């Protein structure tokens, strides 16, 4: 399995571990000049859950792949946390901020895969 797919699986595993909702994977590989290969977008219901989702992704990716993010933007009181793994960008939003920024719409000409919620 290639490294990016393994990384994506670990990220999704981390998000699902803490009950991330509405997870989607945006395939950017066919876009010329894209800054990443994939974006993973999800939401949580509170600042605490966003922080837990981010921590879970960090822990599981580190354990499963040995990778750590190049950078993380946002903190425990941010409505949007971004994690840069180089080939994959992870966006974790509060629902109203996800709706406002609507990243899925910005990249509507790409292949977007919905990942089912666990519950």
Image (cartoon, grey):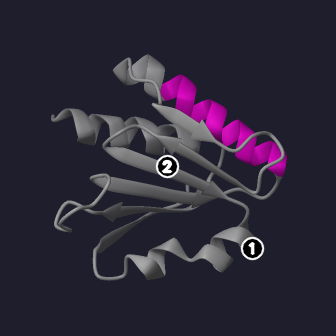
User: Magenta residues, as a range?
Assistant: 47-60
In this figure, what is the number of numbered marks? 2
Seen at 76% across and 57% down, the residue is: 79
Crowding near pointer 1: few (<14 within 10 Å), some, many (20+)? few
Question: Magenta segment, principal secondary structure?
Answer: helix
Is 117 within the magenta? no
Q: In this orientation, does residue 119 appear?
A: no
> To which quarter of the image does residue 75 belong?
top right
Residue situated in front as seen by the camera: 91 or 10 = 91
| Residue furthest out toward the front | 33
Say above or below: 33 vs 51: below
Q: Secondary structure at mark 1?
A: helix
Residue located at (37% from left, 46% from top)? 88
Regarding mark 2 in the picture, which secondary structure is present there?
strand
- 74 or 8, nearer to the observer: 74
Report which residue position mark 1 lands on: 96
Residue, x 55% and y 23% (percent of image)? 59
Indicate left or right for 39 with 78 as reference.
Answer: left
Instruction: Tell me the quarter of the image containing the N terminus.
Output: top left
- C-beta proximity under 8 Å, tags 2 and 1: no
Q: Is residue 59 magenta?
A: yes
Residue 76 circle label: none
In the image, residue 85 above or below residue 101? above
In the image, residue 9 lies at what x, y percent?
36, 41
Q: Which residue is mark 2?
A: 90
């Amino acid at each position: 399995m290639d490294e990016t797919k393994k990384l994506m699986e670990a990220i999704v595993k981390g998000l699902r571990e803490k009950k991330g909702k509405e997870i989607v994977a945006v395939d950017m590989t066919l876009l010329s000049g894209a800054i990443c290969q994939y974006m993973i977008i999800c939401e949580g219901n509170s600042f605490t859950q966003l922080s837990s989702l981010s921590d879970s992704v960090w822990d599981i990716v580190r354990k499963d792949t040995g990778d750590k993010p190049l950078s993380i933007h946002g903190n425990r009181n941010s409505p949007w946390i971004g994690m840069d793994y180089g080939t994959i960008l992870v966006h974790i939003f509060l629902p109203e901020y996800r709706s406002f920024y609507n990243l899925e719409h910005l990249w509507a000409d790409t292949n977007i895969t919905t990942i089912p919620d666990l519950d």
